[in-house]
């Protein structure tokens, strides 16, 4: 292994830059050459590939977004796309690839490895929906962004005795909703992984009102329904002075938290170690504060699980 490349793909996540910096610096420290690929798999197919030096990743550890840009490129699922990608890698004499991204990006990494090109996946997504790791890069930052918004909304909700419905991202996973809802003391947390009963939620809101609660906060994961749809359904039970806030892409930006930067640095360095051992088809992760690697195909097969205990706890603590 003499020359490796790196790309970021799918939805960006705070900490992707810190991970790329770790890959570049660790690789150069180990005597490797590193190339950056712009715009994920799209840039790979188009040959948007350039050499990176130590200085290319300076002043990046604290920046949100991804300096390598990102793209969603479903065409990489085709044989044609993959062969074009490998052709470009060979043309640039690259021996190994690091892909930072979520589920879709892992499929690309898996396909390249199956075609004989060693590729390592680093979990970078705010959704925290990748198996084989306790946390994905960007989740902690997104969570803190949501929490900041939730705390602010609580102030105005109390002043006007309103019910706020906060729609958060997460795609099909409820982690952002669950963790922010627990941390922010939400009255109800609606996640795709578990059925919910509108009667129960309304019962909780009414009970709260009876004992003099001045506000209620309901966090709805986008994978269940939109915040507006939830508000319409709630309105059928009475007037809860509901207001809806859709946090949207604000959750994807911002300077990564210390946790995300440290996680990104550790995972990036480990990805390089694996390539140095000529290993591919692996996804790195963190389990009980230890850096681990798992077969990427297994990670893709395994379903991500939500922590049910936390959901129960959130419900107990917000009575
Ligand atoms: O996967 C990250 C994510 O932000 C999801 O939470 C969300 O559903 C999706 O990406 C939004 O995608 P886009 O930026 O393409 O609208």
Image (tube, rainbow, N blue to C red):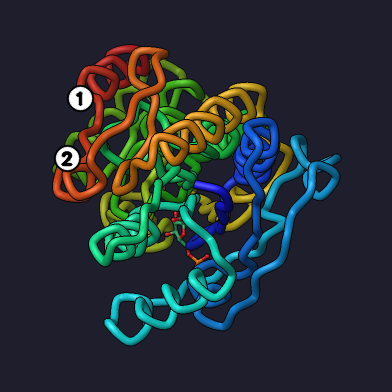
Left or right: residue 74 compared with residue 311: right
Residue located at (65% from left, 51% from top)? 34
Mark 2 = which residue?
A: 194
Hey, which quadrant is residue 38 in on the image?
bottom right
Residue located at (26% from left, 50% from top)? 237
Q: Which mark is residue 19?
A: none
Residue located at (57% from left, 56% from top)? 5
Q: Quadrant of the C terminus?
A: top left
Tell me, yes or no, whether the two marked residues, 1 and 2, touch with CB atoms within 8 Å: yes
Q: Is residue 158 in view?
A: no
Residue located at (49% from left, 71% from top)? 90
Q: Is residue 299 above or below residue 113?
A: above
Q: Position of residue 79 (x, y in %)?
A: 27, 82
Q: Residues within 10 Å of mark 1 (few under 14, many from 20)?
A: few
Q: Residues within 10 Å of mark 2 (few under 14, many from 20)?
A: few
Q: Position of residue 232 (x, y in %)?
A: 35, 61
29 or 102, nearer to the observer: 29
| Element type at mark 1 | helix
Decide which of tag 1 and tag 2 comes sooner along the chain.
2
Q: Position of residue 56 (x, y in %)?
A: 81, 50
Label 1 and label 2: CA atoms lie apart by 9 Å
| Element type at mark 2 | loop
- Counting the numbered discs, the total is 2
Mark 1 = which residue?
A: 308
Q: Position of residue 99 (x, y in %)?
A: 47, 53
Q: Is residue 79 in view?
A: yes
């Amino acid at each position: 292994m003499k020359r490796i490349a790196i790309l970021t793909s799918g939805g960006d996540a705070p900490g992707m830059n810190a991970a790329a910096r770790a890959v570049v610096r660790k690789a150069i420290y180990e005597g490797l050459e590193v190339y950056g690929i712009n715009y994920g798999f799209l840039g790979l197919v188009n040959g948007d590939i350039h050499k990176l030096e130590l200085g290319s990743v300076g002043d990046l550890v604290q920046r949100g977004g991804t300096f390598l840009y990102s793209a969603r490129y479903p065409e990489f699922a085709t044989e044609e796309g993959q062969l074009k990608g490998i052709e470009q890698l060979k043309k640039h004499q690259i021996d190994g690839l690091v892909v930072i991204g979520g589920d879709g990006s892992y499929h690309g990494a898996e396909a390249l490895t199956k075609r004989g090109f060693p590729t390592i996946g680093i979990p970078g997504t705010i959704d925290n929906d990748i198996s084989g790791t306790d946390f994905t890069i960007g989740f902690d930052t997104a969570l803190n962004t949501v929490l900041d918004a939730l705390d602010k909304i609580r102030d105005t909700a109390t002043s006007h005795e309103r019910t706020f419905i906060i729609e958060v991202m997460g795609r099909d996973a409820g982690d952002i909703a669950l963790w922010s809802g627990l941390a922010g003391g939400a009255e109800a947390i609606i996640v795709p992984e578990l059925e919910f009963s509108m009667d129960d939620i309304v019962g909780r809101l009414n009970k709260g009102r009876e004992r003099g609660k001045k506000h209620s906060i309901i966090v709805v994961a986008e994978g269940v329904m939109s915040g507006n749809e939830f508000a319409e359904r709630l309105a059928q039970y009475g007037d809860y002075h509901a207001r809806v806030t859709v946090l949207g892409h604000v959750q994807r930006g911002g300077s990564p938290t210390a946790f995300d930067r440290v996680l990104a640095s550790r995972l990036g360095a480990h990805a390089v170690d694996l390539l140095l051992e000529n290993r591919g088809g692996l996804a790195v992760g963190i389990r009980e504060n230890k850096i681990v690697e798992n077969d990427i195909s297994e990670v893709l097969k395994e379903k991500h699980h939500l922590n049910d205990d936390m959901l129960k706890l959130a419900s107990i603590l917000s009575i």
